[in-house]
Amino acid sequence: MNAASDSSAPSLRQLPPLREIIARHGLNASKALGQNFLLDEQLLDRIARVPGPLAGQRAYEVGPGPGGLTRALLRAGAEVVAVERDRRCLPALAELREASEGRLRLIEGDALAVDEAAEAGRGAHIVANLPYNVGTALFVRWLGGEAWPPWWASLTLMFQLEVAERIVARPATPAYGRLAVLAQWRSEARIAMKVHRSAFVPPPKVMSAVVHIVPKAAPEGVRAATLERLTAAAFGQRRKMMRQSLKGLPGALDALATLGIDAQRRAETLGVEEFVAVARAMDA
């Protein structure tokens, strides 16, 4: 543990329990904002350990709510940049900022509108219990773009279990689709842990899971935009053969023919490497 975390730990430990903070500030989870609060500090500490040692590292958090995961990240020694759009949560987070001795910076606003690389800095670890209503949109954005490696060092994200399984799915399985291809073509994705619905306040109707993703070298000769268009078309009509689902995408059927891929196959039967090869042929 570094000196910063040594000096700040007593202040953090003196904070009231999360349940007391929630009650004092009247922070009932907002269904409209997709909020479900995690209060189990041991579980939160486990999530904060998923990216690896965070002492002296930068963490970027979306939707901290009352600050449960934020506390865990600070206990792990991280410098945290947190984005929260729910103004009700700001007083509670301000208390946490005071206890952090300068290691927590708050940004009020919509995470979809934040210049994340500028605010968090290159090499930050994104760690978040994502609000369900924006989680997938943020995830796809973080995986996209032509610049690679990305500005972030790793993603540690809470999703509904069904979404998490789609991210790590293998070809020819029911969960395999666009998210799997986008997550796996230039990253390594795994489910780090499953989280029971009873761990949340209020309990959601579904189970959740923490997904951990680290970037790897991107295949050469492939544009992310092309792969995104290809997977959107291929899985947009996933029950149809690709000769039907891809007929409106210029160059796609020609690329299949060039590679000797049967256009009568359905999208879920193509592996990630095959999608990459098709996208590369489209750009050739």
Image (cartoon, rainbow, N blue to C red):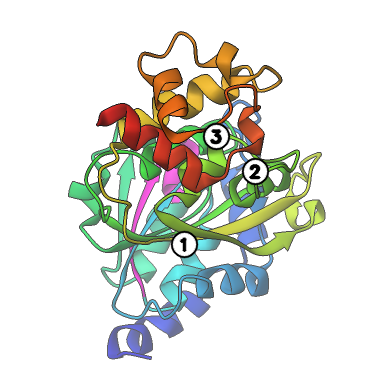
First along the sequence among labels 1 and 3: 1
Question: Residue 111 in the image: x percent, y percent?
Answer: 37, 37
Q: Residue at horizontal 81%, vertical 39%?
A: 205
For the residues marked 3 and 2, what is the alpha-carbon distance in whole angstroms?
8 Å
For the residues marked 1 and 3, what is the alpha-carbon distance in whole angstroms?
31 Å
Crowding around mark 1 (Cα neighbors within 10 Å: few <14, some 14 to 19, many 20+) is many
Q: Nearer the viewer, mark 1 or mark 3?
A: 3
Question: Residue 253 in the image: x percent, y percent?
Answer: 45, 19
For the residues marked 2 and 1, what is the alpha-carbon distance in whole angstroms?
27 Å
Looking at the rendered image, the quarter that the N terminus falls into is bottom left
Residue 84 colored in magenta in the image: yes
Is disc 1 placed on a helix, strand or loop? Answer: helix
Question: Residue 201 in the image: x percent, y percent?
Answer: 73, 49
Q: Residue at horizontal 57%, vertical 23%?
A: 263
- In this orientation, which residue lies closer to the viewer: 15 or 248? 248
- In this orientation, which residue lies closer to the viewer: 220 or 28? 220
Crowding around mark 2 (Cα neighbors within 10 Å: few <14, some 14 to 19, many 20+) is some
Residue 248 in the image: above or below residue 19: above
First along the sequence among labels 3 and 2: 2
Numbered circle sitting on residue 70: 1
Is disc 3 placed on a helix, strand or loop? Answer: helix
First along the sequence among labels 2 and 1: 1
Numbered circle sitting on residue 178: 3
Name which quarter of the figure residue 68 lies in.
bottom right
Residue 4 in the image: above or below residue 32: below
Question: Residue 52 in the image: x percent, y percent?
Answer: 45, 77
Q: Mark 2 = which residue?
A: 166
Q: Residue at horizontal 41%, vertical 14%?
A: 249
Numbered circle sitting on residue 148: none
Which region of the structure is painted magenta? 78-91
